């Protein structure tokens, strides 16, 4: 899946102080890129999954946190979950994702497009099990176990992007007009406003 | 935006009776493709926008309705709206879209990803005005006028796919478990079940 | 059809005052991009089709006229024709095109490559009808009706380019040597020079 | 320049007896592909440049003549010229070309698109000199020497296609209507018909 | 990095009994694809790293072992190592790789191209640490710890391929002539033949 | 094969004094690009093949030597060989290569990946014969004739990169630890150190 332009050099370590360019950050001169840009220790520790209402926390390994992946067409994330925590329904507009559960038990759900009959595919995965999310399809993870759970995922883009659907529908800035959502969800304005009230602070 | 493989021939008119292949339909032999496969009259008439609860109707010009676009990396749609009708919030997982309002007045809304601050961009467009939807971002149209409205859109993929978000979250088959959605939406199960009840019949 | 690199962000509104970069214009900072870059009213009015010898006028919606399409791999054009006006035989070197006739009657002609037997495909299209032009193939439109005609076309590149063939062969700067064209066209130098004389002023 | 999909295997030797597939020929089983499919002797001898009115002859090394390039995104041609012979103005819709003059003296001409001011770039090249033709731009070669000349060119597509412009404008099948060409060329119908009469037999 | 064609559908579960096509396996009909093709348990258990001379064992999750990744442009591997075991210097011709050490301590080495000065980048990584290998560059892993070690890697191609360099140079079938390797390595034929004798049985 | 992003303009002549950008050099303003950037005379003369231990010499026509190919996705090389000279086993990480022998007799060897059974394909080619090297596969040339030999090759990337395998394994900077190579090659440390000693000065 061709989600990024091809690189034109072996590496192009991002100069995060540079002005972001059209297709990624400019490259640091090799002499100042150091020896360790192809490696990262950032995923050894997860964020605090109790710090937000979702009960999950994403530790990103994209170009802003791992400058060595600049132009290489890949990036990673670690996500940690408390029991009952969720990585809410979302879509990556620019990448396919493969993931590995590294501890605990996660319900992984993926929903096909209209052309695939809105079919819901799901499975409870344990440590060592893997999943694949085709580009642009809605998916979520939910910790159905009694312990914390973690996963590490990879993308075939250095900047896959993320569209959290509840937040995008109910917590955009400025908000989508309530009549639009009421019509779309086929419910009264009160229901829409109730949900909107839950997302006034973002994630 | 590279959403389809490049063609390896001028045209490859889809043989819709053939077994669908990995990257599109097989090509008809030129001798049986006829003279008119590069043209279509299908968008001259819209579907009935009163035939469903959204108050809108999509007339598709993709490879299954216009075999001549097979392998060419493009497709089109015509959409018709009654006053108050909507093309509900949705995402095309495999294409960027450009659109032209051909009659009436449409509110077009587009919401950026988390990385773009979930910003909501919107405008009421009249006939002759155009819009662009970056690949994978959520968007909708809503007829805010007193007359019927129509638009014609183009995609840079022959099969962009569509993920209608209300239907995908609340009307998948089988359904996403209610506790997952309640957690994600931060509401009680009753609210989720209410919305789910509106989508039992699909679109 | 992969005619542009993929974007690495949701949008990258062109800073037309910036130095053009390798793969498009640099991005404006989001704070100065405004709220309306995804919309354009430029196609609501066509140019004057009587202002040139072709009897047609192109209103471009590419990145220089619609900075919001920068890096998104799409662009549009509106073309207006007087009766008997033509969009002369031309080729887009970097994009496939889909088009919609919005008023009047246009003869649309498309000629296959040598490998397709130089086959000429044509049809008179009326408002609402559509056509597709595979990347790099020669095509033209000609207003065969008694009224003005218009069309709106979309490309799967933000910069498809245009090679008008009469102008390119007979009006380049400096000119192609006459003996080269005489040999290629299999006619005397006088014929070539006659045609060249029609294009000394460009289009 | 991304003109072909990426291969998904080391090689996929074309089974020319197979039904052509969407993105190339099916692969022969390795056991019957033999040991020499990565090599070709076809370019050691040119065709007869006196066999046609152009005074040039193309020896193709594309997938139909060199099955080993199937899916690899490259192909080659050898072209031979008598003195005064020409490879008439043409366009490759699906590839950039690089070429090497292997004997003689060739005038190589390349014309930029409208966006590049229809600028004509040209040079007389001798054996060992090279040229590059950006995808989709019009170009020609003309033997300005007193001896035969030859060149070998490479494409970054396994099927670049060729649109010979005089033949395409004046010798398509069926022909483009004369009034269309007269308007486009700004000459009388007689001039168009004269040129058309030179191409009734194709190339 | 664009190493695979884009998909034209949500999923295309490989029918491994089908004839392999140009760009992947044909799709199973959705009705027979089942519910679990997006998930795999294959990486929960590693292969026996003592079963070969390298002291490492690769458990592949590519399309032949995980048909659900067909056309999605991604694949994975699990590799297990005994102490002192190595995944010998190798290159993936069609993908960039990102990896996660899941237990133990691995020396990961990556060598830049000539253009990058043949620079050797290396680090000993522990569980939770990650690395990235730009497409086509030579790299290896070596278990420098006292315990078994494991890693899980992801590729941005469904079929990245692998070129093990010692095996390719010294154990191809038929063998590369000894004088070629002696010249390339700048040693006597005896040294080449000695190394060749170690690879007569392949890996 | 999609090894470079597509161009967004006809040409973009490299400004080699500019700061190298993410996907190539910035473009010179057309007014200062001159008239000859699409042509090069650099390949008319080869380098001295006796100037190094390989007995071969590469004359590069990539973007740094031929600024006109910038962003066009192609580049070339001329290589000259003394009798017994070799272009040692190497890999281009970012391009497929097609080549033409222009004088002499060259043994061309190409070795498939593990998935292709490490099969060794080879042939002695004479002037006018051609070969193709799939992206990322190991290959070499060796002058088996009694005279000097030359070839001209083309790549489908403007910066294919080169990984010379003996140099990369035995002459990186800093060196790969000897125990790693001894394990990989299945020989004693002395053998590894002997070969290493031949590459202390690079190529």
Image (cartoon, coloured by chain):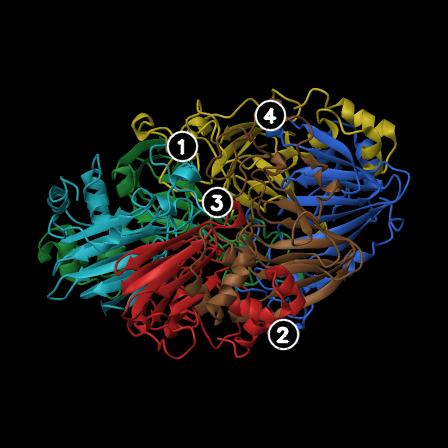
Chain colours: A red, B brown, C blue, D yellow, E cyan, F green
Decide: is A30 above or below B41.
below
Decide: is D92 above or below B122.
above
Q: Are marks 1 and 2 in contact (CB under 8 Å)?
A: no
Which quadrant is the N terminus of chain B positioned in?
bottom right
Chain letter of mark 1 equals D
Residue occupied by mark 4 = B30
- Tell me the mark number nearer the camera, choosing from 1 and 3: 1
Real-space Cα separation, disc 4 to disc 2, in angstroms: 53 Å
Residue occupied by mark 1 = D68
Dot 3: element: helix
Asked if badges 4 and 2 are on one and the same chain, I answer: no
Q: Residues within 10 Å of mark 3 (few under 14, many from 20)?
A: some
Q: Residues within 10 Å of mark 1 (few under 14, many from 20)?
A: many
- Tell me the mark number nearer the camera, choosing from 1 and 4: 4
Dot 4: element: helix
Asked if badges 3 and 4 are on one and the same chain, I answer: no
Residue occupied by mark 3 = F44
Dot 1: element: helix
Residue occupied by mark 2 = A174
Chain letter of mark 2 equals A
């Amino acid at each position: 899946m061709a989600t990024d332009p091809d690189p034109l050099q072996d590496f192009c370590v991002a100069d995060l102080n540079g002005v972001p360019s059209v297709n990624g950050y400019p490259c640091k001169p090799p002499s100042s890129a150091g020896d360790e840009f192809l490696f990262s220790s950032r995923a050894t520790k997860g964020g605090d999954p109790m710090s937000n209402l979702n009960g999950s926390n994403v530790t990103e390994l994209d170009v802003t946190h791992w400058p060595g992946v600049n132009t290489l067409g890949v990036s990673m994330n670690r996500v940690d979950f408390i029991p009952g925590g969720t990585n809410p329904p979302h879509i990556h507009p620019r990448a396919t994702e493969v993931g590995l559960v590294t501890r605990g038990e996660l319900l992984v759900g993926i929903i096909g497009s209209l052309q695939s009959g809105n079919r819901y595919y799901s499975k409870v995965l344990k440590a060592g099990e893997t999943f694949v999310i085709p580009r642009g399809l809605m998916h979520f993870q939910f910790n159905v176990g009694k312990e914390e759970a973690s996963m590490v995922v990879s993308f075939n883009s250095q900047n896959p992007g993320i569209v959290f659907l509840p937040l995008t529908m109910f917590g955009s800035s400025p908000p989508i007009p309530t009549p639009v959502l009421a019509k779309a969800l086929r419910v009264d304005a009160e229901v829409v406003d109730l949900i909107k009230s839950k997302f006034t602070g973002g994630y």
